[in-house]
Image: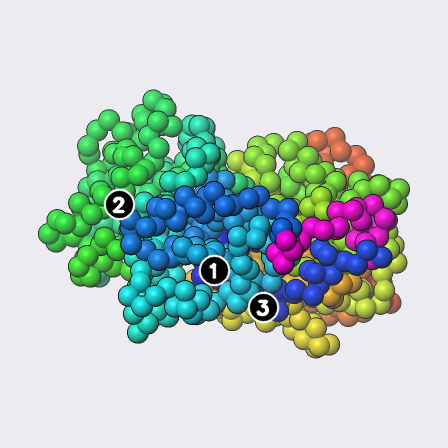
Amino acid sequence: MLTVEASLSIAQEHRANRLRGITEADINLPALDHLLHPPAHLTHLIHGDSAGAAAYERTERNCSLSPPYHRGSNTTLQLQELRARMLPLNINAYIIPGTDAHLSEYIARRDARRAFMTGFTGSAGTAVVTQTKAALWTDSRYWIQAEREMDCNWVLEKDVSIMNMAEWLISEVPPGGHIGFDPFLFSLKTQEDYSINLQSSNRSLKSIPGNLVDQVWEARPPVPPHTLTHLPDRVIQRSWQMKVDHIRNQMRDNPYQPTALLLSALDETAWLFNLRGNDIPYNPFFYSYTLLTMDKIWLFLHTERVTEELKLYLNASCNDSLCVQLKSYDTVRDHLKTYVAQPGVKVWIGTEYTNYALYEVITPEDKLMTTSYSPVLTTKAVKDDTEQKILREAHVRDAVAVIQLLIWLEKAVPEGKETELTASDYVNKCRSKQKDSRGPSFDTISASGPNAALAHYSPSAETSRRLRVDEMYLVDSGGQYLDGTTDITRTVHWGTPTPMQKEAYTRVLMGNIEISRTIFPSGTRGVNIEMLGRRALWEVGLNYGHGTGHGVGNYFGVHEWPVGFQSNNIPFRAGMFTSIEPGYYKENDFGIRIEDVAVIVPAQTKYGHNFLTFDTVSLVPYDRKLIDTSLLSPEQLQWLNNYYETIRRLVGPELDRQKLHEEKDWMLRNTEPFTASGSSASVCSSSLTLITLAVAVLHNVS
């Protein structure tokens, strides 16, 4: 999945981009401008007809007119109130990131402070306000959107580097001036980067823990009223007490001897206690921190949401080492400060997800121990046997929903009425009917024709195109289930693809297969094998500008750090789940991505005993008419046929159980084995028999 995270400070967005692997090559302003603001005579190319042309009339602001023209909300009042609160604090500027206190990928509406102040709702950007000016920095994906949504109080800045923002601050803030920021919304790296770029300028950062935007946001949404829940026994193998003991053992074994572990990322606390909430879009998380010592557990959350049953589950009425002390969410900084004031303590933090507000109170430095990721994140990355089993099961049911979508599209698209948005809605509806469904795991990327050339495009009422049989269509979607999180991308063509489209698709598939079938030593980093996903494309001068895969959770985030193929991901170990998603995007024409989720498993080799490989758990066939088998090696063709036999073996019974006969027939037709003859996906019934027998024999032997 390639979506835009709601981690909205620029430095935090860069960190989130590393998670996705998005590069500047993937951020294509000309293509975006062509799609979102076309000339009137080209509007039919966006929508498939002339509908919607009026949507493009005078949508961008014009601040040179008198009076200025804009369609965005008027931000004058909130700017006046914010500036009034800046004066008594003696700050000349105030920085407003778009993230939350947990540096989350997605944020809740109540944390959309930058959007409230500016009117700009894009998911990447940082705002700065002085007494006379207000500016927004965002990257090229969002320039047009920002011009449409902001009023003329705001200036759009297009160089998103912190260096550029610092230069702007130096030009606007007088010598000796102070630049305020909420330390809860700054990562350690963000604060460090600002400090480095402001040094020697005689301007300084000033940490202000009470957020000034919250003080002027009278209608700020409250914390959701939903109570928290714990996972049922059928989907867990390790109780929260077992997990606490395991993490304490890691603390005890650490040579630096930490006395406490601070957990700041929302998925850390949720995993540790087997709890889930509903505070964050697409993610079953809840606002929380945890401070764990060898004999105490302090859980910081909105205590009014904890039921009596949950208190009993957490042993909240006692004071032993496996009793959870419930504390108010807003007291975490004060409590941490009190703990650190004790002699002989040392607090372990993961620097990637700890905000500066908590970091700055852990003083002196010898009371601090840092690693990039906490032991909870690295432990959570390796799924236990139960987690692996149920995540596989979730993907079987998820395959049913995606197959239903593809069948519906095959029948509906020729009628000319369906759009990117209706397709997105349909796949969500299909998933909602599956057992243990908990909604989508992200905003579906439903993209046809030139829209699909934007790797992380998601349709809106303004940009949604009608689906056409003569264009390629890419759908990247996923579901949350009580037993797992899914993420899958399929690219299809309902008409006759061009030779270039067919070759590009096949080479993307070859990259997916090459990673999936590779065998590597345990402890190998994803970045060291990532090029296998690109090699077939490189051979003909093609490439893609995003990452090749990311970790996937168990009813958690669809992007689960720190697993994946980037340079700062941790080494692969058996039991980790990752996506594998090479692609290719031809500007203003089409986009291709083939994404599967795979689990890392031990590999059987002739001599070695500590080698791993990938076992694909996404179970939806690829588009046959787009596969040129003459390009595939015998090993790739064999892998593909084995994969299709796995789909038949696992998804077939589930389709039977749900009495989905049409879907079963479609699946069987689309998983017939390939032969290497010719340039198309030909079928041989004898091959089917041989492959079925071979797979059965191999299965029995293993």
Identify whether 329 is placed above or below 384. above
* For residue 331, side relative to residue 395 (left or right): left
Secondary element under disc 1, as helix, strand or loop, is: helix
Secondary element under disc 3, as helix, strand or loop, is: helix
Tell me whether the residue at label 2 lies in contact with that at label 1, contact meaning CB atoms closer than 8 angstroms. Answer: no
Which residue corresponds to mark 1? 10
| Span highlighted in magenta in the image | 42-66
Question: Residue placed at 45% from the left, 47% from the top?
Answer: 79
Residue 687 tag number: none
Residue found at the very far left of the displayed protein = 343
Question: Residue placed at 17% from the left, 45% from the top?
Answer: 338
Q: Where's residue 22, x and y in %?
A: 57, 63
Distance between the alpha carbons at the discs numbered 2 and 1: 25 Å
Return the residue nearer the eye: 146 or 605: 146
The amino acid type, in three-letter code, at marker 1 is Ile
- Mark 1: few/some/many CA within 10 Å (<14, 14-19, 20+): many
Q: Is residue 254 visible?
A: no
Tell me whether the residue at label 1 lies in contact with that at label 3, contact meaning CB atoms closer than 8 angstroms. Answer: no
Distance between the alpha carbons at the discs numbered 1 and 3: 14 Å
On the image, which quarter does residue 615 sit in? bottom right
Question: Residue placed at 72% from the left, 51% from the top?
Answer: 58
The amino acid type, in three-letter code, at marker 3 is Glu
Is residue 64 inside the magenta stretch? yes
Residue 24 tag number: 3
Q: Nearer the viewer, mark 2 or mark 1?
A: 1
Residue found at the very far top of the displayed protein = 308
Secondary element under disc 2, as helix, strand or loop, is: helix
* For residue 693, side relative to residue 45 (left or right): left
Which residue corresponds to mark 2? 333
The amino acid type, in three-letter code, at marker 2 is Arg
Q: Main secondary structure of the magenta part?
A: loop
